[in-house]
Amino acid sequence: MHTYMLLMATLGFYSFNFHIDPSDVEISSFQGEDAVFLPGGASPFDAGDPSLPGSGYSMVIPQGMELEDVRVEVLSSVELPGAYRISPVIPLPLSETIPTVLPHSSNYLNGTFPASSIQNIQTGSKTGFNIASFCFVPFSWNPGDGTLRVVTEAVLSPVLRENTNSHSLCLTDYQIRTASRALESVVSNPEMLAAYAPASSGSRGAPWVVIADETQQEALQPLIDLRAATHGSAFVSTEWIYANYSGRDTQEQIRNYLKDAFENQGLVYALIVGDFGETTRLSGLNIGGTLLEGVTDLYFSDLDGSWDGDGDSNFGELNDGIDYYSDIYIGRFSTDVLSRLATMVGKTVAYETTAPPGEWQTTALLAGAGLWVDDPPGYWGSFVCDSIDTRIPDTWTVHKLYEDYTSHPDNQIELYNQGVAYSSLNGHGNSGGVYWFYQPSTEIVTTGNYYEMSNSGMPVVFHSMACHPGHLQDVACIAERLMFWPQGGAIAVMFNSHYGFGTPPAFGPSEWLELYFAQVLFQDEQYELGVAHAVSKDEFKANVSISMQRWVLQENNFLGDPATRFIAGQMGVEGGEISASEPLIFTPSPNPVSSICTIGYNLPLPGSAEISVYDVSGRVVASINIGLQGAGDSSVSFNSSELPSGCYTVVITVGAKAASARMLVLH
């Protein structure tokens, strides 16, 4: 096995340069101790450990490699004035109160904490891309004398080694292109995505499938027909899967089909139809004695391994070897009732084909209730709402409904009926809904008021940090009711199947996931809603390390068609999708290339095209005039043997329109 320093220009960077100003560090009093805050930082330590925040980093790395270590060169550090008693990490279900005596681990009795500034070194795979991540904690604290030092400038140099257990995939251009687009906002070196992409296999199969009982196909057909036009679609019956794929239970049989379709048939999106039962996997994740035992559709999205690494048939445990990156995009219509299924199909088709125009398409509603309010100023859902608001475009109308010690708003249903495209609900919850903290009329959106929604034609995208509103084991939890309510309700729901978790007084993992979804949807413009949900988990996993993170990643599920395009990103809305007349060029195959490669491309209309290859200085080093071509996919061969090793940009030009891809030449 060989080890390599990441000190090669072909990796897109030499090292990470860390820098903070001591004034960026905030310290406040919490329960008689000192809480430390760093902008964008979170504590990667376990419950009871000193809560010192760190900064996360992630990168795409070559196939067959993994992150072994990160070498730290400290250039400058300072000791903060005073003596400190650092408050501990307190991961709490939103339903529990903060203990009056905070639990402290043995690390309060030992020497300087932490023992290492580098935490959570990990390597995972997303759709064949190799993603490495780590957390750098710039603080060191001595519990004995209370001294607290902070690194203000450092150079962080990742170290790679060969991974002899790695499994390289050969995927379609569509799969690679979709994952590459998603990873642009996740990794620190997106310019290297083309160089380190999995091998390309051209085009195969339908990117979108729906899995359902064969008796449900007729009700699903309008959506299947729509997806045939937008993506390429197929219906796959559960009966066929059970007859053709092995597994210890129906859930594993479905997952084995998905894995085969992903690796060999070009699968990108899967819509699973089914209420709690044979199509839902319960997680066996146990953290500190708290058992998740909630539905986790991430089991069907993260297709690496078996999710049962220890072989005990309890899926999703800490030692089951899960990397938590989505390989495909999963959504669910959670019902076995044909009339409810027909309602969800009809709403989805109408949302993309006949949705009414109007200001509702750029309107959001943020609800922030009391979370931990015993000690003023308390901790409120409005905190995460305000952070979400900074991600929403300034041109949007944003309704902020915030609770305080004296009152809370009660006009949310009225606002939904006027028209809201996106809504974040931040309060306590149960399977019946999400609630305000104080009486009277504690309902925000619950089984007691959802039926007052008359927003037909303007369904809402819902996300929430609350406990249990997506508890699919219950009969018709609020997440399901919002989806099949025929008079309006939701087009997509992202709710928790068990406890939401916070870490007061800092942002907790449930809040981080909400924030990342807003970031991915509004700023990164990942407008396919199931993709945005999955990528928000990917970005959260890659760039934040925090207690109970794996719990939150497993429990927050997506109800709806994963390929549904957000109303503000549909054609005709500012910031919407690329015109259908744009050409496409795919990642060369193989890539890296040493001699002959294939360059695939797509022309939406017949025309004359030219492919040019540019070096890093912008100089054209090769040209291919492919002449008059018909519409659709095609490809040409290119000999790179006369080009020096290095990174190149491959550009296809059709009239005034162009598209590009990266190519890495290695001899």
Image (cartoon, helix red, strand yellow):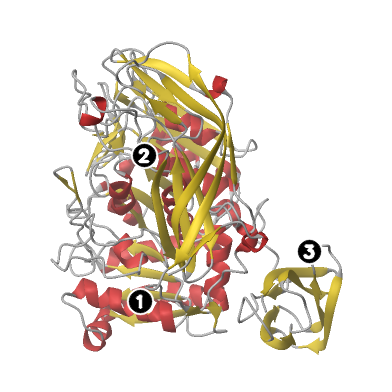
| Residue 294 visible, this orientation | yes
Say what amino acid the circle numbered 1 marks.
Answer: Lys
Label 2, secondary structure: give it: loop
From the viewer's perspective, is 441 left or right of 425? left
Residue 397 appears at what percent x and percent y? 58, 35
Q: Does 121 appear above or below 198?
A: above
Say what amino acid the circle numbered 2 marks.
Answer: Pro
Callout 2 crowding tier (Cα within 10 Å): few <14, some 14–19, many ≥20 = many
Residue sitting at x 39%, y 80%: 261
| Residue 422 visible, this orientation | no
Residue 337 vs residue 520, the one in the foreground? 520
Callout 3 crowding tier (Cα within 10 Å): few <14, some 14–19, many ≥20 = few
Return the residue at label 1. Answer: 259
Quadrant of residue 167 in the image? bottom left
Return the residue at label 3. Answer: 616
Quadrant of residue 587 in the image? bottom right
Return the residue at label 2. Answer: 44
Alpha carbon distance from label 3 to label 2: 38 Å
Alpha carbon distance from label 2 to label 1: 32 Å
